[in-house]
Each structure stands twice: as structure tokens, then as C-alpha cells.
Image (cartoon, rainbow, N blue to C red):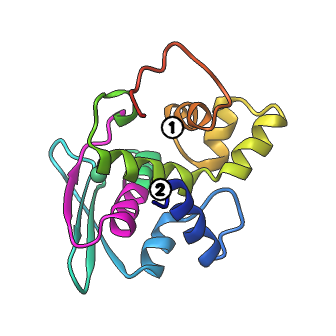
Amino acid sequence: MISAEHRAQVLRERLRLTLPAVDVCDIAQALGIAVNYVVLEGLSVTTFCHDTEIEAFVDDTQPDYRQRLALAHAIGHSQLHPGRAFACTLVAPEVTAPIRRVEREASRFAAALLMPDWAVRWLYAKGYSDEELAEVFRVSTEAVFWRLHHLGLIREQRYRATAD
Ligand SMILES: [Zn+2]
């Protein structure tokens, strides 16, 4: 079983994404995913992975960093769960437990795509704060926090997800 982390890493390498921060719209385009920006009532993103085409609908009333996470999550579904449809709410999914396996996988893929392991470890070792990391990767500080925790760089009682 290849992990979501590894799949995201392979995708980054395939698309030659060498900078820490990625353009998720470019990635979606490279993968042939049609991205639509709409108003989604109470949802962050919906993903439809048909046989021949993949569509993602992103809630454009959300801040930029949330839209990036939502689209990266949709890309995760498209790569990990082909042929299926998803309607996802990403308002702090990391602390909402329990969550479905497929949602956890898509969220992990998104985190790995937006915040690659090597870059997070390197900058963290240089002393970057959560806020600085959030700025580098253009994500929320919550997303950074979750990523640091998942990579084993911090242990924090605040973190209550039952991820594993
Ligand atoms: Zn999802």
C-alpha cells in the first residue's frame, strides 16, 4: 500500500515541483482537472472523478489559503480514489475525529503536496515559526501545526485527532 504522503511526493517529482510553495491551480491543470469556483453552502470542495474527466468545485468565498487546501485535497481524491465523487468540508478536518479513511488520505495527500516533508523539516530546523512556515507554504497556521505534528516534529496536547 503506497501512502498518500508518498503519492504526493511522486506527483511533485513528476511535475518537477522543486520550490516549497506550489501553485495548486497549475497542478490541477497539469492533471487535466477542471476547476470551477462556485459558492458551496457549507462545503469546501466537491470532486467528481469520472472515467474521462475530473472536475473540482471549490468554494470561492473561502480565503485563499483554504481554497488552496481544498483544491489540493480534491487533487488527492483524484489521485487516490479514482472513479468516485466526494463532497468535503475542510473546516479543521484535522481535529474532527473520527474521519473517514478516504478523507484522511486526501487530507494527508494535500498536506504533503502543499508542505513537502523535506522543506518543512529544513525550515523548521532553521527555527521558522508556525506563522513563518504558513507564509512560506501559503497555508493556515493550523495546517502547519497539523503537518509538524504528523511529521513528528512537535508533540502537543492541543492536538486531539485520532489520525491513526
Ligand atoms: Zn474529501
Viewer-proximal residue among 27 and 102: 102
Q: Is residue 129 depicted above or below 69 in this figure?
A: above
Task: Give the mark nearer the N terminus: 1 vs 2.
Answer: 2
Q: Which residue is mark 1?
A: 143
Indicate the position of residue 113 as horizontal and vertical percent values. 54, 58
Along the horizontal axis of the image, is 46 left or right of 93? left
Disc 1 residue type (three-letter): Ala
As helix, strand or loop, the secondary structure at mark 1 comes to: helix
**Do the numbered discs 1 and 2 sit on residues whose CB atoms are within 8 Å?**
no
Indicate which disc residue 4 carries.
2
The residue stretch that appears in magenta: 70-92
Mark 1 nearby-residue class (10 Å; few <14, some 14–19, many ≥20): many
Along the horizontal axis of the image, is 73 left or right of 44? right
Q: Residue at x 28, y 66 (%)?
A: 56
Mark 2 nearby-residue class (10 Å; few <14, some 14–19, many ≥20): many
As helix, strand or loop, the secondary structure at mark 2 comes to: helix
| Residue 15 is at least partly visible in this image | no
Q: Quadrant of residue 101?
A: top left
